């Protein structure tokens, strides 16, 4: 189980470090998480960029605590995902639900359903920083 969590987090880190091309989606799959990088583009705020990623989670997958160098806006596309933000009670979101994860907030996510779940993650982050940082 611990190996699966490490592999899942490694997937997020590797995919977050890889460059994205706005003209062509790129997929990364390692273990039970599949990321399709959709967009990386500068925004009107100097030193910030928007990044958009479709993330699919196999049933039961847990992504360990991590954070991002900016805000993350989650929109659940399918299934049921449980988010655990530091200092907050866990919240289960179903398809059509959305969540804002504040800048730098450590959080974990788990597919609590019996089928594949997916989220559309939109990040407004600092340019040049890794998209994913492992939380202590």
Image (spheres, rainbow, N blue to C red):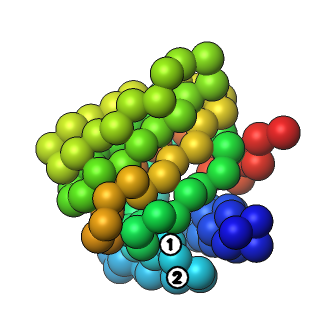
Q: Quadrant of the C terminus?
A: top right
Q: Which residue occupies the foreground of this view, 3 or 44?
A: 3
Secondary element at tag 1: strand
Most distant residue in the right direction: 136
Q: Is residue 120 above or below residue 26?
A: above
Expressed as whole percent of the image width and height from the top left, the position of residue 27 reads 45, 81
- Judged left or right of residue 27, residue 81 is left
Q: Which residue occupies the foreground of this view, 57 or 105?
A: 57
Q: Are marks 1 and 2 in contact (CB under 8 Å)?
A: yes
Expressed as whole percent of the image width and height from the top left, the position of residue 133 reads 73, 47
Q: Is residue 109 above or below residue 20?
A: above
Secondary element at tag 2: strand
Q: Which quadrant holds residue 22?
A: bottom left
Expressed as whole percent of the image width and height from the top left, the position of residue 54 reads 36, 63
Instruction: Say which mark, if any, is on residue 88.
Output: none
Q: Quadrant of the N terminus?
A: bottom right
Q: Residue at x 52, y 77 (%)?
A: 32
Q: Which residue occupies the foreground of this view, 36 or 44?
A: 36
Which residue does the numbered mark 1 point to in the structure image?
A: 33
Instruction: Say which mark, if any, is on residue 29.
Output: 2
Q: Which quadrant holds residue 82?
A: top left
Confirm whether residue 78 shows in the render.
yes
- Judged left or right of residue 28, residue 67 is right
Q: Residue at x 76, y 65 (%)?
A: 2
- Judged left or right of residue 119, residue 123 is right
Q: Residue at x 49, y 21 (%)?
A: 89
Most distant residue in the top direction: 87
Expressed as whole percent of the image width and height from the top left, the position of residue 76 reads 27, 49
**What whole-number distance in Å separates the C-alpha atoms at marks 1 and 2?**
6 Å
């Amino acid at each position: 189980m611990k190996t699966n969590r490490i592999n899942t987090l490694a997937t997020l880190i590797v995919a977050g470090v890889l460059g994205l091309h706005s003209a062509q989606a790129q997929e990364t799959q390692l273990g039970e998480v599949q990321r399709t990088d959709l967009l990386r583009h500068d925004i009107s705020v100097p030193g910030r960029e928007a990044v958009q990623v479709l993330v699919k989670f196999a049933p039961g997958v847990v992504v360990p605590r991590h954070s991002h160098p900016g805000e993350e806006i989650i929109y659940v596309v399918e299934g049921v995902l449980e988010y655990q933000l530091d200092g907050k009670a866990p919240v289960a979101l179903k398809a059509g639900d959305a969540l804002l994860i504040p800048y730098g907030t450590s959080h974990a996510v788990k597919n609590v359903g019996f089928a594949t779940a997916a989220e559309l993650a939109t990040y407004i982050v600092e340019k040049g920083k890794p998209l994913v940082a492992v939380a202590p």
